[in-house]
Image (cartoon, rainbow, N blue to C red):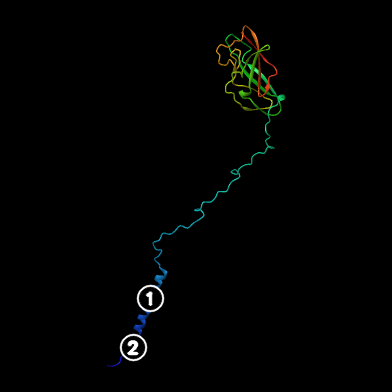
Amino acid sequence: MPRPSAAVYRRRRLVVVIGLILFLAAVGVGVWLLIAKPWANADASPKPTSSSSQTPSTTPTTDAESPSPSPSAEQTPAIVACEANDIEVTAVTDAESYAAGVLPKLSISLTNKGTKDCTLDVGSTTQVFTISSGADVWWRSTDCQENPSSMIATLTAGTTVTSKDPVTWDRTRSSVETCDQENRQRAPGGGASYHVEVSIGGFTSLTTTQILLY
């Protein structure tokens, strides 16, 4: 058999070389695809990136929100209890004379003659009305008093206040033993004179208020 010519050998080598190049190229592309994985993120939804607007920030505390210090005793001096020299107590009646069957209504007038405000217990626990005829005590408001209570009030310097709810005298003689009796001794009328004295918070009226019963 005649040997192939040199040209044939060259063509065969060229074909082998080209085939080898194509094979190596294919292998290289496959390796790149395995490593690079260009499809890996093709369908994945983009993840939101964090930003300062997504992270809640802490609002700084303003001066108005900061607790204010309580005033010290030097800044707001305590109001002291009233003293006898500063308080004037007077018994007040709704009339000077009363017709037969009309019941006297009694109130209290309080004046702070001092230059400073002061406190006083003005509750019914400390109130005592006393009605007398000469040396004869006819009636005390505390003899049959029910449910007395305390109430601390501040009396403004230089002012006068009067109790709003008057106490009524039923024109009878009172005692702790006769509170439940319906027929207690009645005070004489016909122009008889009686004097009303009152004390409150430990302070007693310096004068009495006269009333006449008919």
For marks 1 and 2, the one nearer the N-term is: 2
x, y percent for residue 90 = 67, 19
**Given the current orientation, which residue lies at the most extreme right position?**
85
Does residue 123 sit above or below 208 in this rendering? below
Circle 2 sits on which residue?
9
Camera-side residue: 149 or 212?
149
Residue type for callout 2: Tyr
Residue 188 lies in quadrant: top right
- Which one is in front in this view, the residue at disc 1 or the one at disc 2? 1
- For the point 68% across and 22% down, the residue is 203
Q: Residue furthest front?
A: 177
Question: Where is residue 173 drawn, in percent x and y?
Answer: 61, 13
In this view, the residue farthest toward the bottom is: 2
Q: Quadrant of the N terminus?
A: bottom left
- The x and y percentages for residue 140 are 63, 17
Mark 2, secondary structure of its residue: helix
Q: Nearer the viewer, residue 60 or 163?
A: 163
Q: Position of residue 26 (x, y in %)?
A: 37, 75
Which part of the image, by quadrant, shows the C terminus? Answer: top right
Q: For mark 2, does the 10 Å Cα neighbourhood hold few (<14), some (14 to 19), or many (20 or more) residues?
A: few
Amino acid type at image mark 1: Val
**Left or right: where does residue 194 sit relative to residue 31?**
right
Label 1 secondary element: helix
Badge 1 density bin: few <14, some 14–19, many ≥20, Cα 10 Å: few
Which residue is label 1 attached to? 27
Tags 1 and 2 in contact by the CB under 8 Å rule?
no
Residue occupying the far left of the picture: 1
Q: Residue at x 35, y 83 (%)?
A: 16
Q: Quadrant of residue 33?
A: bottom left
Q: Nearer the viewer, residue 142 or 19?
A: 142
